[in-house]
């Protein structure tokens, strides 16, 4: 299976604007969310393109088992868009379990 040309790999360290954690690069693919609180920022239209002007907080609202691992379901606090991102190997397992065990929050 070929990788989509709509995926731009950007794997840089950042400080989470929600919880303040210092987040290192992931090392094997692009890191797109905080490994501590799992939040992200709505900056992309397609992964890594930095083409969204929204800038809202992507809040994890659910999780599902995907073909390549756990997918975290996000809802933007500002514009309401829903997105899915693959969980990283070093994400906080307690938070993933919590959102997996709760019904999808709208």
Image (tube, rainbow, N blue to C red):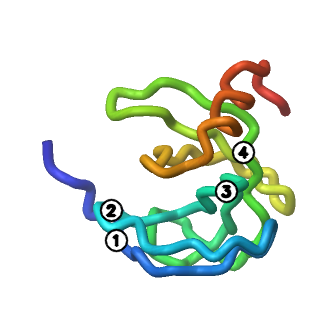
- Along the polypeptide, which appears first: circle 2 or circle 4? 2
| Mark closest to the chain's N terminus, 4 or 3 | 3
**Residue highlighted by disc 1:** 9
Circle 2 is placed at which residue position?
Answer: 29
Q: Are marks 4 and 1 in contact (CB under 8 Å)?
A: no
Q: Left or right of 40: which side holds 91?
A: left
Tags 3 and 2 touching, CB below 8 Å: no
- Choose the circle earlier in sequence order: 3 or 2: 2
CB atoms of marks 1 and 2 within 8 Å: yes
Query: How many neighbours does mark 4 have within 10 angstroms: few (below 14), some (14-19), or many (20 or more)?
Result: many
Q: Earlier in the sequence, mark 1 or mark 3?
A: 1
Q: CA separation, marks 4 and 3? A: 12 Å
Residue pictured at 59% horizontal, 61% vertical: 33
Question: x, y (%) of residue 73?
Answer: 63, 39
Q: Earlier in the sequence, mark 1 or mark 2?
A: 1
Report the Cα–Cα distance between label 3 and label 2. Answer: 18 Å
How far, Cα to Cα, is label 1 from label 2? 7 Å
The crowd level at tag 2 (other Cα within 10 Å; few <14, some 14-19, many 20+) is few
Under circle 2, the secondary element is loop
72 sits to left or right of 75: left
- Residue that protrudes farthest toward the left in the picture: 1
């Amino acid at each position: 299976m070929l990788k989509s040309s709509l995926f731009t790999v950007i794997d840089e360290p950042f400080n989470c604007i929600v919880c303040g954690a210092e987040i290192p690069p992931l090392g094997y693919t692009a890191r797109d969310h905080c490994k501590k609180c799992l939040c992200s920022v709505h900056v992309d239209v397609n992964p890594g393109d930095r083409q969204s002007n929204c800038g809202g907080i992507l809040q994890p609202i659910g999780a599902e088992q995907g073909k390549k691992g756990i997918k975290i379901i996000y809802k933007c606090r500002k514009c309401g868009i829903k997105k899915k991102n693959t969980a990283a190997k070093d994400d906080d397992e307690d938070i993933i379990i919590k959102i997996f065990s709760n019904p999808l929050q709208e």
